[in-house]
Image (cartoon, grey):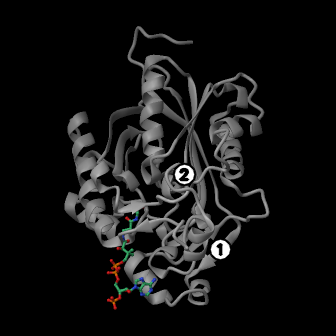
Amino acid sequence: MTNLSHEVNTKILGTGIYLPEKIMTNFDLEKIVDTNDQWIYERTGIKSRRISSTEGGEFPTDMAEKASWKALQAAGLEPNDIDMIIFASVTPDQKLPNSASLLQQKLGITNKCASLDIAVACSGFVYGMNMANSFIKTGMAKKILVVGSEMLSTEVDWTDRSICILFGDGCGVAIVGQAEEGEASKIHATHLGSDGSGKEFFNQPVGGAIEPITETHLKERTHFMRMKGGEMFKVATRTLADNARVVLERSGKTLDDVDWIVPHQANIRIIETTAKLLGAPMEKMIVNIQDYGNTSAATVPIAFHEAIQDGRIKRGDLVLFDAFGAGLTFGATLLTY
Ligand code: UT7
């Protein structure tokens, strides 16, 4: 029952993930492009990544469905308890209809809940969480399924070693709702933003309204994602550190209060530099980039879920989600789990 006479706090009720079965190691990549395991591991921290099957069953809404069943079970909820879906992805199954509506149907949700997609690249899950927090706090929704699901393997040029080594496919979800009175769970502070002046650092201009894909693009391979890695690296470390400082200041908490930082997994050196800039020990950083590479909107929820599963993140812990991505979008969430 909604009782707006006391402060409404947002609680993460359950999480779930799905990773495609196919594992592509750095050694597999050595056979495709001029690279090697040592370079990739030393420069990025990545050992392997998952690749979705194109035969079906592992497209973004398929992965989201599988992850959502796990989160529903963890939360003790039925599909029709969900009254909003926020689906973060830059690699939707199809252009229309949107992925959240496709997922609603796959989960058998018949309550016609609001279903919206957000395309803010690697910050997508954090954007979704922060938006969900606002909807929960205003009472507009009671149980929100927040999804980060990506199939980037279709958007990278597998002949370009500067980019194809970095990305992978996967999905992570969280269901959020109201905390019961007296529970510690709470979102203390949120932060979202974007700096469009950095649009050239990471983009995919071909395939939209201005420049539909033509035979020439396919031949010249210009329809894939393009990234200025060095520029992104510099912005990333500054942004992740700033994000963290903003939510700490907004909540009146300090880094010492924070038990875990769940950063976007783009490069282990970005995570290490961010930790250094913040003065945080690496032991506080949740890292799984070695196994999955950069899965864009899915990195934070996958890392978060795994850390809950292996017992590192516990109820009552103070957790900081911290992300940045193409746009250049950015965001952070400071929450008691
Ligand atoms: O989700 C957000 C988006 N992504 C990011 O934020 C990624 C941010 N950027 C990065 O992670 C790094 O900049 C990269 C991993 C992309 C690149 O690492 P780097 O240390 O900046 O390498 P670099 O581009 O400066 O290249 C160094 C050398 C070059 O050779 P020369 O010119 O020094 O002879 C490259 O050609 O490494 C070469 N190189 C490679 N060698 C083996 C580049 N890619 C590879 C490769 N294998 N895959």
Q: Residue, x 58% and y 71% (percent of image)?
A: 216
Picture quarter with the C terminus:
top left
- Residue 130 percent across, percent down from the top left: 41, 35
Q: Secondary structure at mark 2?
A: helix
| Mark 1 Cα-neighbour bin, 10 Å: few <14, some 14–19, many ≥20 | some
Q: Could you tell me how many numbered marks the image carries?
A: 2
Q: Earlier in the sequence, mark 1 or mark 2?
A: 1
Quadrant of residue 292 in the image? bottom right
Q: Secondary structure at mark 1?
A: strand
Quadrant of residue 23 in the image? bottom right
Task: Report if residue 32 is visible in the image.
Answer: yes
Q: Residue, x 69% and y 40% (percent of image)?
A: 103
* Above or below for 292 versus 17: below
Q: Nearer the viewer, residue 243 or 201?
A: 201
For the residues bearing labels 1 and 2, Cβ distance under 8 angstroms: no
Q: Amino acid at mark 2?
A: His
Residue 192 relative to residue 309: left or right: left
Q: Residue, x 27% and y 52% (percent of image)?
A: 197
Q: Nearer the viewer, residue 35 or 275?
A: 35
Residue wearing tag 1: 23
Residue wearing tag 2: 305
Return the residue found at the far top. 5
* Above or below for 159 versus 243: below
- Residue 35 percent across, percent down from the top left: 49, 88
Q: Residue, x 27% and y 45% (percent of image)?
A: 257
| Mark 2 Cα-neighbour bin, 10 Å: few <14, some 14–19, many ≥20 | many
Q: Amino acid at mark 1?
A: Ile
Foreground mark, 1 or 2, reads: 1
